[in-house]
Amino acid sequence: MTANEWNPEKLLRVSGDYWQTCALHAGVKLGIFTAIGKDCLASPEIAQKINGNLRGVTMLLNALTAMNLLIKKDSRYANTPAGTSFLSKDSPDYLGFMIMHHHHLMESWAHLDQTVKTGKPLRTRSSYSGDERRESFLMGMFNIAMRVAPRVVAEVNLANRHHLLDLGGGPGTYAIHFCLANPQLKATVYDLPETRPFAEKMIAKFDLPHRIAFMAGDYLKNKIKGTYDIVLLSQILHGEGPDDCEKIIGKAVSALEAGGMIIVHEFILDNTMDSPLHPALFALNMLLGTPSGQAYSEEQITGMLAGAHVKNIRRIPFQVPNDSGIMIGYV
């Protein structure tokens, strides 16, 4: 039996893995890792800090210990290095916003069968949701992009470029990292008006307001003002159907100067559409949350770019854990 072959044990493990997922989500949502911080506390102290029931809190603490997220010694609990680094709000590497974004998605995933039968989404898009969910989505994107953006930047040479348009740029993470790596570069982050406070907060955090501006708008409905010599489309095409993707790419290309570069960063499927695993599952996430969004193959993205008269299209070799990919072309 090969490592990838299914058997009863593996099937049941995957079926029940959501128990661990829910325990992790509860620990983050309740602020347990933040409450413990660098201390070693007894369960009554932790329960008091988070205003929780002692019986329930103790059971969750023991489960998180069994998951190797906490350390238990003499009936007291401390964070593991991972808990301190990634699950405490006091850490600059906090991943809790993305974890809470995943938590908000769980309700719709539990009814995937219904959406597969109807073809209709079960939830609204996170960028249009209420304040808490929007914050989790935008700051979750920041969490992930802070880890991926430096790798993307390292693969794309912008040494002779001067003005980047980060279309649908959210909190501006990619614009920030491209500007940090290219001192001559300025950038404009284009996104919905509700995104402005998050983007401006992050841009200020990196001391870049003099080089990165925010432009409010809807890239499907509004015209893109200005001209640029690079446009970045990072993780926005999957939210739309093929026709709207062609419209977005057309608008992006129309905002480019002659010789301008377009960069597409996406979860890219193989041309058979059935691998890698994360893009294939992500397509289902788009089924649950959008009327026509999906993951696209390299062949499909190439076709949409070529249809907008983009030339010299190529995929840059790029490996990250979530199987995202980079494609570039020129006008």
Image (spheres, rainbow, N blue to C red):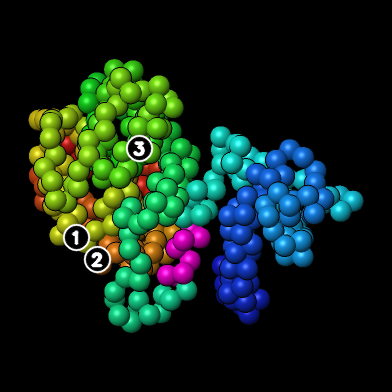
Mark sitting earlier along the chain (1/3): 3
Say which element carries label 2: loop
52 in relation to 256, above or below: below
* x then y, percent, for residue 231: 22, 36
Q: Nearer the viewer, residue 128 or 79?
A: 128
* x then y, percent, for residue 22: 60, 64
| Contact, mark 1 vs mark 2 (Cβ under 8 Å) | yes
Mark sitting earlier along the chain (1/2): 1
Residue drawn at 52 percent across, 53 percent down: 99
Give the quadrant of residue 18. Answer: bottom right
Q: Is residue 33 magenta?
A: no
Cα–Cα span, label 3 and label 2: 28 Å
Give the quadrant of residue 67. Answer: bottom right
The residue labelled by disc 1 is 242
Label of residue 110 in the image: none
Left or right: 73 as drawn, with respect to 227? right
Residue 59 can be seen, yes or no: no
CA neighbours of label 3 inside 10 A, class few (<14), some (14 to 19), many (20+) = few
- Tell me the mark number nearer the camera, choosing from 1 and 3: 3
* x then y, percent, for residue 230: 22, 32
Q: Nearer the viewer, residue 203 or 329?
A: 203
Label of residue 292 in the image: 2
Q: Main secondary structure of the magenta part?
A: helix
Left or right: 133 as drawn, with respect to 239? right
The residue labelled by disc 3 is 197
Mark sitting earlier along the chain (3/2): 3
> Where the C terminus falls, by quadrant?
top left
Q: Nearer the viewer, residue 69 or 35?
A: 35
The residues colored magenta run 102-109
- Tell me the mark number nearer the camera, choosing from 1 and 2: 2
160 in relation to 327, above or below: above
